[in-house]
Image (spheres, rainbow, N blue to C red):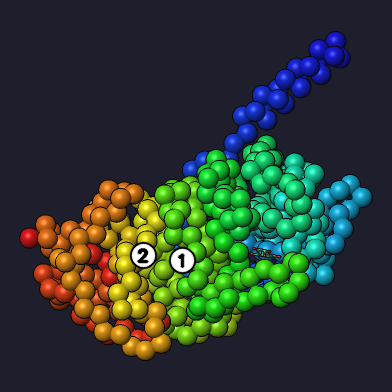
Amino acid sequence: MRSIVLSIVCALAMTFAAQAQKFENLAMTPPMGWNSWNTFACDISEKTVKDMADLFVELGLDKCGYEYIVIDDGWMLRERDKDGNLVPDPAKFPNGMKAVADYVHSKGLKFGIYNCAGSQTCGGYPGGRGHEYQDARLYASYGIDYLKYDWCNTGKMYAPEAYKTMRDALYTAGRPVVFSLCEWGDNQPWEWGAEIGHLWRTTGDIYCCYDCEYVVNKGQPNQWSAWGVWKILRMRQDIRKYAGPGHWNDPDMLEVGNCMTAAEDRSHFALWALSAAPLILGNDLRKANKETIETIKNTEVIAIDQDKLGIQGYEYKMQDSVSIWVKPLENNEWAVGFVNTSLSEKEINFDFKQNVITDDLSGKSLDATKNEYVFRDLFRHENLKNTTKKPVVAKIPSHDILMLRLSVKTK
Ligand code: GLA
């Protein structure tokens, strides 16, 4: 009798495991939120998380679409407990993690956490390897809505299987979670990630600068580089076809408000929107100045990112150091960004009639020889008098962007 019961239990367990999948109908537009890493690294606490959740509401970021508050590496003790459970560091999270999740939820927001597929996180805390189902149950008991899963200390592990194991564990734990794969594009996650997670990092880490490379551990075997926004964005221009509702290319979290000029921050934010990238803030919202708030709350630019078609934009051409980015939108609208990548002001003169733009991926075309389009300037928040009947002529300061939304003129 006992063995019959056991066989039935085993059969049921196997059926359930075989049915495990990623949680569908999540991240149907690129996820928006805040993550602790870019500003705080491992120096995080309950107080910081609560302050950010408060500010999401006070600043009205929640109304702009920001939803997830995610804590990154450094939230736990260096060792698991005697039962193998992860333990939140009581010095940083004195009331445990459920209390933090409850607080974030009480603000109408969602809560995310971090771990790593390897034996240890990049910061040297216990990784998930071999504990996936146990950890997934723990996260579900906290009330976690988002998991960022890193790729340090993975030795010879096979990325698609490692991430699939965690995906199945999350699914089995039963609480819907946005699953963010953070393996830096090393194993082409765009080719296998859509079945497993909702977003995947496409590159190494971002570094707060416009166009630099920051070398870490220079000259040592573990040397790696972090990249400025302009570099990171152009690094993987060949994979836009893999992005779409529920599965996004992730060029890493935002550095808006962290070190760059207001013009660079505008370009950074708008380029992420043109790329249908996740908009995960990485600044200390308590210290954000007026220009930073204006940029991150620019709902007209956010709407480009969150367009329901979910088509990742691309660089159409570079013209005299001005990089022209385009993104097809719903209702035959288009977003177009003119980014001045040079160190001096540039005057652009761009004739849409001479530049019929056809996106091979979506089959959409911005054809000003057939339609007349009107322009809206998404940073000035005004409709322009000009239409595609005449060229766009504008002066763009160094590293700034002219960001337009084009709609077919109605009679
Ligand atoms: C890696 C990730 C970062 C961050 C750190 C934490 O470098 O790419 O985004 O999560 O680990 O240690």
Above or below — where is 242 with respect to 208? above
| Callout 1–callout 2 Cβ contact below 8 Å | yes
Residue 1: give x, y in percent of width and height: 85, 10
Say left or right for 94 vs 160.
right
In percent of the image, x 61 and y 55: which residue is there?
186
Closer to the camera in the image, 342 or 285? 342
Q: Earlier in the sequence, mark 1 or mark 2?
A: 1
Q: Quadrant of ligand 1?
A: bottom right
Amino acid type, mark 1: Arg
Query: Left or right of 296: which side holds 402?
Result: left
> Judging from the image, what secondary structure is the residue with disc 2 in?
strand
Answer yes or no: is residue 349 visible. yes
Residue shown at the point (85%, 14%) measured from the top left = 3
Q: Is residue 170 visible?
A: no
Can you identify the residue that label 1 sits on? Answer: 234
Q: Which residue is mark 2?
A: 315
| Amino acid beneath label 2 | Glu
- Quarter the C terminus occupies: bottom left
